[in-house]
Image: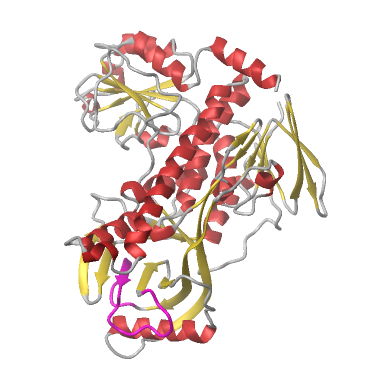
């Protein structure tokens, strides 16, 4: 079967290529550049716990030295500290990393990957589809035709794939603008991110009175100043004055020494593609959505796109047409991103609109601070990983279903489990392999070797039920899981979202849930495939 064609070699495209390769799906990455990224210290990304873990799992490296994990978060208004959070292990800290460093890590992981070919200096200019596959044409020094089974556009906000497929991209332009600087200096705090609203010193020029400082490795900081609406020019002189005033204000006196490394202006747009699938062509990342106001970060959602799509494409590539499964990518991911955009658009007028809510609601200042904290730290509607509560892959009501602290469709908690070979691993380490995960909650098993309990109690019956499922599944055992009673059985998707929790071994319910998760019965899939072929 032909490889999957991925257009775009940014973080999302490279992550998708790795995710497919880990499931033995060949792919071609069309990179319009020379195969490396220009270092830009001021172009950085913040990854939450789940997306940082995704990259580390796929690239098989630790990002600890490549980026900076915040030791804490502080938000201030004028001179008052509104909130302080210390990341002491109870809450995982975000990871702040330069984008060119992140893509470098991903490129290095791909360099020895036999399932992936990266075609540099290959700019897409044409796509043709038929029932059996898709053909992409590239121009440039190495222009040629590429034949693929599917094509995924990960080619950014100005996506050529989206334009060729004539997919609309409505939304709002310039929702926020930020002046950005990356500099090496010492601040009064170390490795702690800061959001400072309405600082007491006078900002030169027009200002909305908000500045953010985020640490990077080697004593480097990224500073962002929120700019007022409009198109006022950010001159070098204005930016230098802003840097000196801010550093002096935080130091409580003279401007401390600093080395300016990079500057820029970051403009946030809010847009959402009407469709994320056009037969064998898909959109992911900035090609499908743009968001980022109030501290949120669009790359998180782009990486979650790749994680969601990879196992579905892999299943279709290995086992034939699974139209309902492939359709679920758009249904699930677009709904999650749309909800985040709605939440941001509803909050922006209250947060940025001057008096507004503050004039009528006591404590609204702290409410505004909560919204911003959620955006920056990945909490709540603005930042938390989305749940696929209304997924078309949900199995519906099951007789043996029981509640746990993770609702169906939400990402599972990363607990320690015993794998089939008897080793102790994290649950998250077993994701992304294309297999369903069946997790038995069995208190006390961690103190015994697997050989002593693998054939005892309900394990043989559960193992038989797992072997009979319509898709390959791995059986794991956990000492405990939040909200789960002993002998609860969890069914988890390859991307780490909970399908259902069952009370004990219920082979019929487990089979029904697994069948729904992979898109329905084989007969229905065959009919859907025939229908797709006639389009």
Q: Which colour scheme is used?
A: secondary structure
Left or right for 518, reference 81: right
User: Does the magenta stretch mainly form a helix, a strand or a loop?
Assistant: loop
Q: Position of residue 262 (x, y in %)?
A: 53, 75
Residue in the image at 65% along x and 30% along y: 279
Residue at the far left in the pictured view: 362
Q: Where is residue 247 in the image (x, y as percent from the top left)?
A: 36, 82
Report the label total: 0
Nearest the eye: 158 or 251: 158
Left or right for 187, reference 469: left
Q: Give the range drawn in magenta.
A: 187-208
Q: Where is residue 213 in the image (x, y as percent from the top left)?
A: 37, 70
Residue in the image at 36% along x and 36% along y: 411
**Residue 320 seen in the figure:** yes
Residue at the far bottom in the pictured view: 254
Nearest the eye: 161 or 512: 161
Q: Position of residue 346 (x, y in %)?
A: 37, 53
Residue in the image at 31% along x and 18% along y: 451
Give the quarter of the figure containing the C terminus.
top right
Question: Is residue 70 magenta-colored?
Answer: no
Left or right for 226, reference 147: left
Question: Is residue 192 magenta-colored?
Answer: yes
Give the quarter of the figure containing the N terminus.
top right
Nearest the eye: 365 or 304: 365
Residue in the image at 61% along x and 13% along y: 527
**Residue 41 seen in the figure:** no
């Amino acid at each position: 079967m032909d490889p999957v064609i991925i257009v775009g070699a940014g973080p999302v495209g490279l992550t998708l290529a790795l995710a497919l390769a880990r499931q033995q799906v060949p792919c071609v990455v069309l990179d319009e550049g020379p195969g490396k990224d220009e270092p830009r210290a001021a172009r950085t990304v913040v990854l939450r716990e789940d997306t940082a873990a995704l990259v580390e799992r796929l690239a098989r490296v630790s990002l600890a030295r490549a980026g900076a994990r915040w030791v804490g978060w502080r938000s201030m208004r004028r001179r008052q500290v509104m909130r302080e959070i210390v990341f002491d292990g109870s809450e995982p800290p975000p990871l702040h990393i330069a984008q060119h460093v992140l893509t470098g890590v991903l490129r290095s992981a791909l360099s020895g990957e036999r399932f992936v070919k990266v075609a540099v200096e290959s700019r897409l200019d044409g796509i043709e589809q038929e029932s059996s596959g898709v053909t992409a044409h590239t121009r440039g020094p190495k222009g040629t035709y590429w034949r693929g089974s599917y094509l995924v556009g990960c080619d950014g906000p100005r996506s050529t794939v989206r334009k060729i497929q004539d997919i609309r991209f409505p939304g709002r332009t310039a929702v926020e603008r930020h002046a950005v600087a990356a500099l090496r200096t010492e601040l009064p705090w170390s490795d702690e991110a800061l959001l400072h609203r309405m600082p007491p010193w006078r900002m030169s020029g027009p200002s909305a009175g908000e500045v953010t400082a985020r640490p990077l490795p080697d004593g480097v900081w990224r500073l962002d100043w929120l700019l007022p609406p409009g198109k006022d020019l950010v001159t070098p002189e204005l930016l230098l004055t802003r840097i000196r005033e801010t550093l002096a204000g935080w130091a409580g006196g003279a401007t401390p020494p600093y080395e300016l490394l990079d500057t820029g202006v970051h403009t946030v747009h809010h847009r959402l593609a009407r469709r994320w699938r056009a037969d064998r062509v898909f959109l992911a990342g900035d090609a499908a959505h743009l968001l980022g106001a109030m501290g949120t970060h669009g790359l998180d959602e782009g990486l979650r796109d790749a994680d969601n799509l990879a196992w579905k494409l892999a299943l279709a590539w290995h086992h034939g047409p699974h139209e309902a499964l492939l359709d679920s990518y758009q249904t699930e991911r677009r709904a999650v991103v749309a909800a985040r955009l709605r939440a941001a658009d509803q909050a922006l007028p209250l947060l940025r609109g001057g008096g507004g809510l503050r004039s009528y609601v006591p404590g609204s200042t702290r409410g505004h601070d909560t919204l911003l904290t959620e955006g920056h730290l990945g909490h709540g509607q603005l930042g938390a990983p989305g749940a696929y509560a209304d997924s078309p892959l949900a199995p519906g009501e099951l007789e043996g279903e029981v509640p746990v602290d993770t609702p169906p469709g939400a990402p599972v908690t990363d607990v320690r489990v015993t794998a089939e070979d008897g080793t102790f691993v994290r649950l998250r380490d077993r994701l992304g392999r294309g297999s369903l995960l069946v997790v038995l909650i069995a208190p006390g098993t961690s103190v015994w070797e697997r050989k002593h309990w693998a054939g005892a109690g309900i394990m043989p019956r559960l193992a038989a039920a797992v072997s009979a499922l319509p898709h390959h599944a791995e059986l794991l055992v956990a000492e405990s899981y939040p909200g789960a009673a002993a002998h609860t059985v969890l069914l988890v998707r390859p991307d780490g979202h909970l399908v259902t929790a069952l009370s004990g071994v219920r082979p019929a319910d487990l089979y029904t849930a697994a069948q729904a998760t992979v898109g329905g019965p084989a007969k229905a899939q065959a009919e859907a495939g025939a229908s797709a072929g006639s389009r």
